[in-house]
Image: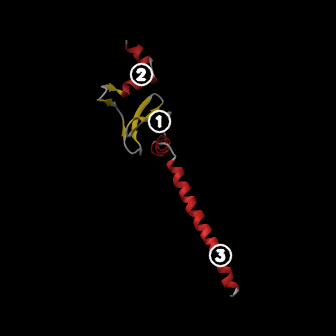
């Protein structure tokens, strides 16, 4: 057995180890991406798509498929991919409640007093 053959024999396990480590790294990255919450993903996307908008809160749990975005005194909605933006009222037809109006009153209770 030549010296080159011996080196090749020694190098084979290290290739296996490198391949295994690369596979584990890729799996770790995939798992890390899966643990990011929808709100965090939307926040990152909005920073790219609406860079001048200061987002103060994101709630992706109230309305299935939509995230409620608070930007100062403004309220709007985006889908979880932050592709579609909805400006206006969201109305729950089952409970017959204007979700947007209720949320705006939570954000600014003086609106109710001022209207009276």
Q: Position of residue 47 (x, y in %)?
A: 49, 43
Residue 105, numbered circle? 2
Q: Is residue 5 left or right of residue 110?
A: right
Q: Is residue 48 left or right of residue 99?
A: right
**Which circle's residue, 1 or 2, is located before the other in the chain?**
1
Marks 2 and 3: CB-CB under 8 Å? no
Residue beneath label 1, please? 58
Q: Nearer the viewer, residue 114 or 29?
A: 29
Mark 2 surroundings within 10 Å by alpha-carbon count, few (fewer than 14), some (14 through 19), many (20 or more):
few
Q: Position of residue 49 (x, y in %)?
A: 45, 45
x 63%, y 72%: residue: 13
Mark 3 surroundings within 10 Å by alpha-carbon count, few (fewer than 14), some (14 through 19), many (20 or more):
few
**Which circle's residue, 2 or 3, is located before the other in the chain?**
3
Q: CA distance from mark 2 to mark 3?
A: 68 Å
Q: Look at discs 3 and 1 and give the one toward the viewer.
A: 3
Figure check: 7 above or below 100: below
Residue beneath label 3, please? 11
Q: Position of residue 94 (x, y in %)?
A: 29, 29
In the picture, the quarter occupied by the N terminus is bottom right
Secondary structure, mark 1, is: strand
x 37%, y 25%: residue: 101
Q: Look at discs 2 and 3 and give the one toward the viewer.
A: 3
Q: How is the image coloured?
A: secondary structure
């Amino acid at each position: 057995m030549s010296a080159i053959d011996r080196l090749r024999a020694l190098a084979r396990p290290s290739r296996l180890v490198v391949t295994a480590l690369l596979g584990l790294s890729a799996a770790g990255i995939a798992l890390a991406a899966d643990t990011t919450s929808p709100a965090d993903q939307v926040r990152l996307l909005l920073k790219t798509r609406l860079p001048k908008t200061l987002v103060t809160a994101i709630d992706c749990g109230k309305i299935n498929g939509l995230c409620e975005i608070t930007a100062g005194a403004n309220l709007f909605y985006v889908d979880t991919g932050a592709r579609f933006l909805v400006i206006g009222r969201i109305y729950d037809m089952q409970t017959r409640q204007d979700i947007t109006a209720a949320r705006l009153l939570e954000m600014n209770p003086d609106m109710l007093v001022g209207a009276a």
